[in-house]
Image: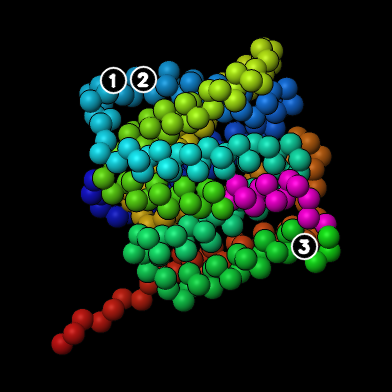
């Protein structure tokens, strides 16, 4: 599906993604106090169908969701499902600001995959962004000091999974609508999590139900915003717009949970930010042959 490239439209859609994912981080921390992450993900996916139904109806019904790329949807959403499980679990182990800071290695993996499989150009600026991002995450997790913990490793694994998922989303947007991408995400993830959820099911309290509802709304429509943004710009342009989530989430963790980021996390996040800013520099225009 062709769309006129527009960084402005991509930024507007990404602002929706930014707001909704920030709220979801807090909701995930609150819900995980009581429910297993499999249960959280399953309720979120099933509730997503209800939230999406009016949009599907207005778009012309389920006929508009037919796809010839079902295997791509399945692959993308299984990777994303595992990454999302890791992300929710990491929220229970380390400060939410640190989870998000590590998550922002995602543009590194997205840039590499987009260049390798989607024919997006790997400019010197993008290479510099990858190097700075890798240095930044090493500074955050500090492997030489023996201070790596389980939460950091899970968060890093989730970031790699999100990078793979992001590259696959970009590929899907070439032929699929944002609505179709979101619908098949809900289908695949609800099927994948059904049996694990039955094995760990506990009935949520009214408090947990409220937060799961927030996760369902934010999780469903954040991905609609993301898929829409991808239609207006390359993955390596869209993803770095999300970096504002790092200071915002760190502030939320400080205000709500008295979490403080250490100097190493701040330094590592700053390096990743610098890399992402370099990544936004436009590629040089190639001169036409005379």
Residue 175 % position (x, y) = 26, 45
| Residue 260 x %, y % | 80, 47
Q: Which circle, 3 or 2, is nearer the viewer?
A: 3
Position above or below: 151 against 280: above
Confirm whether the magenta stretch covers residue 22.
no
Q: Residue at x 60, y 37 (%)?
A: 85
Residue placed under numbered mark 2 in the picture: 53
Residue 156 among magenta residues: yes
Q: Which residues are magenta?
A: 147-159
**Quadrant where the C terminus is found in the figure:** bottom left
Q: Residues within 10 Å of mark 1 (few under 14, many from 20)?
A: few
Q: Position of residue 128 (x, y in %)?
A: 54, 73
Above or below, 234 against 26 in this view is: below
Please give the label number shown on residue 57: 1
Would you say residue 178 is visible in this rendering? no
The answer to whether the residues at label 1 and label 2 have Cβ atoms under 8 Å apart is yes
Marks 3/2 in contact by CB < 8 Å: the verdict is no
Image spot of residue 266 (x, y percent)? 73, 58
Residue for point 43% across, 18% down:
50
- Looking at the picture, tell me which residue is in the foreground, 214 or 176: 176
Q: How many marks?
A: 3
The CA distance from mark 1 to mark 2 is 6 Å
Look at 36% across and 20% down and name the residue there. Answer: 53
Marked residue nearer the N-terminal end (1 or 3): 1
In the image, taking residue 230 as reference, residue 200 lies left or right, namely right
Q: Is label 1 in a helix, a strand or a loop?
A: helix
């Amino acid at each position: 599906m062709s769309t006129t490239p527009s960084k402005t439209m991509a930024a507007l859609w990404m602002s929706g993604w930014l707001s909704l994912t920030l709220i979801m981080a807090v909701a995930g921390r609150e819900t995980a106090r009581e429910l297993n992450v499999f249960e959280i993900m399953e309720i979120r996916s099933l509730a997503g169908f209800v939230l999406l139904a009016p949009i599907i109806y207005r778009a012309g019904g389920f006929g508009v969701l037919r796809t010839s790329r079902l295997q791509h949807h399945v692959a993308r959403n299984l990777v994303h499902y595992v990454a999302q499980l890791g992300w929710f679990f990491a929220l229970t182990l380390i400060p939410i600001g640190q989870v998000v800071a590590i998550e922002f290695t995602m543009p590194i993996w997205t840039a590499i995959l987009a260049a390798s499989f989607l024919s997006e150009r790997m400019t010197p600026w993008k290479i510099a962004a990858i190097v700075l991002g890798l240095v930044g995450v090493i500074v955050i997790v500090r492997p030489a000091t023996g201070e790596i913990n389980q939460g950091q490793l899970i968060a890093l694994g989730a970031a790699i999974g999100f990078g793979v998922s992001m590259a696959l989303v970009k590929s899907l947007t070439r032929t699929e609508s944002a609505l179709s991408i979101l619908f098949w995400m809900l289908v695949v993830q609800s099927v994948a999590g059904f049996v694990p959820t039955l094995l760990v099911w506990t009935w949520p309290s009214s408090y947990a139900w409220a937060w799961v509802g927030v996760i369902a709304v934010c999780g469903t429509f954040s991905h609609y915003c993301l898929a829409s943004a991808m239609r207006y710009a390359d993955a390596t342009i869209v993803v770095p717009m999300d970096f504002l989530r790092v200071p915002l989430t760190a502030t939320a963790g400080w205000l709500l949970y008295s979490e403080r980021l250490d100097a190493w996390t701040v330094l590592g996040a700053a390096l990743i930010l610098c890399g992402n800013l370099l990544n936004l520099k436009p590629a040089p225009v190639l001169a036409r042959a005379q």
